[in-house]
Structures are given as structure tokens and as C-alpha cells.
């Protein structure tokens, strides 16, 4: 969690570039011990890493080990104090002020990232302890620092506002972002605070053309709009429009709600594509309870439009059978993007589907490698670039690949595992409605 990722890690600019090697070394050992679930052994290394006043990230590691909410927050307070001091030293007394040099550059400027990781950790802690109002306040502060939502907090804010029954604010916030998606407003014209200086929400519909533009828009925003609109005005045209758009953008959320699949217990780790299964998983981790409330659930389950939009067709072209209930068919466990009514249909379709499936898996492997600050697997034959923003401007850098040798080794291992698993080359198959995200966190998802 505390680990710098992406370009910051690749090019070794972690921790403002000013944290001592000694402190970074102790932090890495502590992080590894935590990852291996040996927190007690990590404590002495954490204490040592903290001795360097420039180390901020260590407080993100430490906060997750604190036994109580109060202590977790105090731990982050100390990290925040240090990060603010470092920023003020470099950028002057107005480093964090509304009219300061860093406003709207937070997160993009590498120097600000440790500060933003602390902010993100606050949100996470507040949510873990169900302190939703405090989480809302922290996210609003993040939007003040950079209205462009560099940390993707817009995917959480709407639901958190709904948890605190601020449905009008949730809808206004969603409308600001949907207006950008619909082409009503340019991204450069986002108001300061990115829609967190709340006004009353509008009560109108998007035109057919605007709705077309919103088709693949960030689904968590669309779901927020649907839920908030329903809570404010009931089963009206607005709520139905938002729900239809949301279900179109990421049907996986609605599939799981309608299938009454058990709420995820953990967030996924690592990168995700927009509106992919990981996003659906994480959205439900936070928000599922809001949708399972009696009034809301009976609304979505009686909405035939929405229900119909999430039924899958069997991926075999010779079959094309449609599900009769959401999440009925088994999904290809390789790519999670295609469903089959039966093992036979998957076998029949495998020759056709295999190239797509392999490509999706390669793209995912690249995403995971970049996010972990690791080289890209050598057998991926596309150039991979990563962009970053700093005070010096935007720079692009090609991501190094692993050597062929190292990769071969890995491949061999993988192959062995696969053969032990399911034998033949008929394509991997998952459980009905199963989700990669759920598997990744070592859990089985069962229907309630
Ligand atoms: Zn079939
Ligand atoms: Zn597949």
C-alpha cells in the first residue's frame, strides 16, 4: 500500500528523492514482512525507518498495524505533518494553500505523492471503521488539492455521500462529472474542488446524443447518479436513465446485485481497466449495502430494462443461447470477458476465442507489471510507455522489459501449473458469475 508505484518506482524517485537509503531499506523490509502477514516482526524496522524525518510513506505502512481507529489516525497525522513540512520547505508557506503553486498539481508533481498517499490512507482508514462523514471530508480536501481527481476518488465519493444520506450532494457531484462525459462541459472547466462545492442537483435528462457519449463512462458515477436520483425522486425517468446508462457501462455491478452475490470482503489489489471486473468488485465492496436496502433492491429487480441489459449470450456462435437469470453462465477464467452456457460450447469456441483471450491476458500482465514498478514481460511485443507529470512538465519513458531468460523460466513454471490444473487446451472456465477479483483475494464467491 505504501509502496510507490508506476514511474515513481521505476525511475527511483520514491520518497521525494530525499529519504535516506537506510530508511528506505528498513521500510522495504517492513513492507515485505507486512505483505507476508508478519506485522509483529515488521515493527522494529518501522521504528528504524521512522527515524528519518523525511520518510512519510512509512506512516502509511504503520497505520494499518495500529490496533484502533484513533491510533491509526494519529499515525497518519504524524505522516501528514512531515509531508506538509517538506512541501513548505521546498515550495514556500503557501505550498498547500488555495492560491499556492501546487494547487491542481497534487499527485502529478512527484514531490506531492507521499502527501497524497497519506490522504488516500486517511480515506481508507475512515472507511474501514465506517466513519463515512470523515471519509467524505478527506476526499473533499483531496479535490481541493487537485480538482481533476488524480487519485480516482470520484469512484468513492458518491457512495460515501449516500451513506451519510447526502443524496442531493451525491447527485450534483455525479452530474458535474457526467456533464464532462456527455460533452456538456470541458474537463478544463471543472469548477474548483471538482464538483465538491455542492449546489442543488438538476432535474433533467441527457439528450440521446449525450447518452450515447455516456455509454462507456465511469460506471461508479453513473450508479451513484441512479441511486441518488431514486432516493431523491423515486422511480422517475431520471433514475431509470441513470440506471440504464450504469448497467450499460458496467453490467457486472448490476449482475451481482440482481444475482444477490455475496458482498466482496476485500478490495482488489493492482490496476484495473475502466469498468472492468475489478472496478465492479471494488465498487460493490464499498457500496453494495446501499443497493441491498429493500426499497432500492426491489426497484432494480423490477426494472425490466436494466435486468434485460445484463443477461449474457453464450459466446459460442453456434449456440448464442441467452441467460434466463443474471450471472447464470460460466465465464472464461482466462479473460473474464465471455460467457458460455456449457463446457461443450466453450470447447467448440476455443479455437476462435483463444487469440482474443491471450491478448487480454497479455495486456493485464503489462498493467500489473507497470503498477508494481516491474519490467514488462519480454514476450509482450508492443512498446509500453508510461507518462508522468512533474514540475518539469510531462515526460514519457519506455518501460524496460525483462530478459528473455527470466521470462522463459516464469513461463515454464506457469505451464506446469496449468497442466496440473486442467489438462487439455480447451480454454479455462470459471464458475457462474465468478469474478477474477474475488479469486485474487483468495475468496470464493457464493450466492446468498
Ligand atoms: Zn452455448
Ligand atoms: Zn477468454
Image (tube, rainbow, N blue to C red):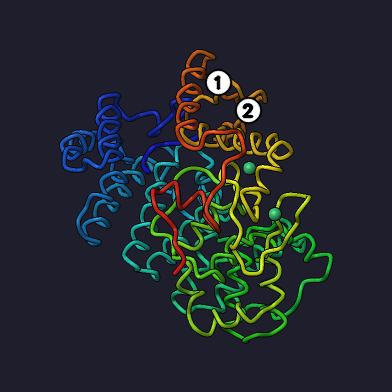
Q: Quadrant of residue 33?
A: top left
Q: Callout 1: helix, strand or loop? A: loop
Q: Residue at x 64, y 34 (%)?
A: 358
Q: Quadrant of residue 155?
A: bottom right
Q: Which residue is mark 1?
A: 401
Q: Residue at x 70, y 81 (%)?
A: 203
Give the image location of residue 197, x and y in percent: 55, 69
Q: Callout 2: helix, strand or loop? A: loop
C-beta proximity under 8 Å, tags 1 and 2: yes
Q: Residue at x 33, y 49 (%)?
A: 80
Quadrant in which the C terminus is drawn: bottom left
Q: Which residue is mark 2?
A: 384
CB of mark 1 near ligand 2 (< 8 Å): no
Query: How far is the residue under mark 1 from the one under mark 2?
Result: 9 Å
Q: Is residue 178 toward the left or the right of residue 410 in the image?
A: right
Q: Quadrant of residue 67?
A: bottom left
Q: Is residue 243 toward the left or the right of residue 377 in the image?
A: right
Residue 112 to residue 242: above or below = above
Give the image location of residue 267, x and y in percent: 43, 54
Viewer-side residue, 309 vs 95 = 309
Residue 294 to residue 18: above or below = below
Q: Is residue 273 toward the left or the right of residue 42 in the image?
A: right
Q: Residue at x 77, y 66 (%)?
A: 211
Give the image location of residue 100, x and y in percent: 50, 49
Quadrant in which the N terminus is drawn: top left
How many other residues sit within 10 Å of disc 1, few (<14), some (14-19) or many (≥20)? some
Viewer-side residue, 303 vs 199 = 303
CB of mark 2 near ligand 2 (< 8 Å): no
Amino acid at each position: 500500500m505504501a509502496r510507490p508505484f508506476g514511474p515513481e518506482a521505476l525511475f527511483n524517485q520514491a520518497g521525494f528523492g530525499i529519504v535516506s537509503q537506510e530508511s528506505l531499506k528498513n521500510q522495504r523490509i517492513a513492507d515485505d514482512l507486512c505483505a507476508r502477514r508478519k506485522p509483529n516482526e515488521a515493527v522494529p524496522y518501522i521504528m528504524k525507518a521512522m527515524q528519518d524525518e523525511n520518510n512519510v510513506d512509512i506512516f502509511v505502512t504503520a497505520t494499518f498495524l495500529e490496533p484502533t481507529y484513533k491510533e491509526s489516525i494519529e499515525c497518519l497525522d504524524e505522516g501528514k505533518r512531515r509531508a506538509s513540512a517538506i512541501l513548505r520547505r521546498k515550495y514556500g508557506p503557501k505550498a498547500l494553500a488555495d492560491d499556492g503553486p501546487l494547487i491542481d498539481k497534487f499527485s502529478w508533481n512527484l514531490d506531492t505523492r507521499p502527501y497524497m498517499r497519506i490522504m488516500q490512507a486517511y480515506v481508507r482508514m475512515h472507511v474501514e471503521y465506517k466513519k463515512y462523514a470523515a471519509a467524505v471530508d478527506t476526499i473533499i480536501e483531496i479535490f481541493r488539492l487537485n480538482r481533476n481527481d488524480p487519485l480516482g476518488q470520484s469512484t468513492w465519493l458518491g457512495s460515501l455521500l449516500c451513506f451519510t444520506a447526502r443524496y442531493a450532494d451525491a447527485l450534483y457531484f455525479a452530474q458535474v462529472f457526467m456533464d464532462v462525459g456527455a460533452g456538456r462541459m470541458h474537463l478544463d472547466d471543472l469548477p474548483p474542488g471538482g464538483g465538491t462545492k455542492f449546489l442543488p442537483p438538476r432535474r433533467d435528462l441527457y439528450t440521446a446524443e449525450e447518452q450515447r457519449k455516456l455509454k462507456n463512462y465511469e460506471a461508479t458515477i453513473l450508479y451513484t447518479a441512479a441511486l441518488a436520483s431514486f432516493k431523491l425522486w423515486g422511480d422517475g425517468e431520471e433514475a431509470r436513465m441513470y440506471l440504464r446508462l450504469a448497467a450499460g457501462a458496467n453490467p457486472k455491478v448490476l449482475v451481482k446485485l440482481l444475482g444477490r452475490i455475496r458482498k466482496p470482503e476485500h478490495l482488489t489489489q493492482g490496476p484495473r481497466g475502466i469498468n472492468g471486473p475489478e472496478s465492479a468488485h471494488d465498487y460493490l465492496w464499498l457500496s453494495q449495502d446501499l443497493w441491498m436496502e429493500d426499497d432500492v433492491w426491489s426497484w432494480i429487480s423490477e426494472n425490466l430494462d436494466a435486468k434485460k441489459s445484463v443477461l449474457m449470450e453464450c459466446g459460442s456462435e453456434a449456440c448464442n443461447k441467452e441467460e434466463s437469470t443474471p450471472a447464470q453462465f460460466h465465464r472464461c477464467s482466462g479473460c473474464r470477458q465471455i460467457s458460455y452456457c456449457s463446457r461443450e460450447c466453450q470447447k467448440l469456441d476455443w479455437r476462435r476465442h483463444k487469440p482474443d483471450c491471450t491478448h487480454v491476458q497479455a495486456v493485464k500482465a503489462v498493467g500489473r507489471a507497470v503498477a508494481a514498478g516491474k519490467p514488462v514481460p519480454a514476450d509482450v511485443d508492443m512498446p509500453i510507455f508510461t507518462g508522468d507529470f512533474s514540475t518539469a512538465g510531462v515526460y514519457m519513458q519506455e518501460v524496460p522489459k525483462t530478459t528473455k531468460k527470466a521470462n522463459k523460466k516464469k513461463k515454464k513454471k506457469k505451464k506446469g501449473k496449468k497442466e496440473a490444473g486442467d489438462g487439455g487446451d480447451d480454454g479455462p472456465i470459471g464458475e457462474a458469475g465468478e469474478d477474477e477479483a474475488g479469486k485474487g483475494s483468495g475468496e470464493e464467491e457464493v450466492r446468498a
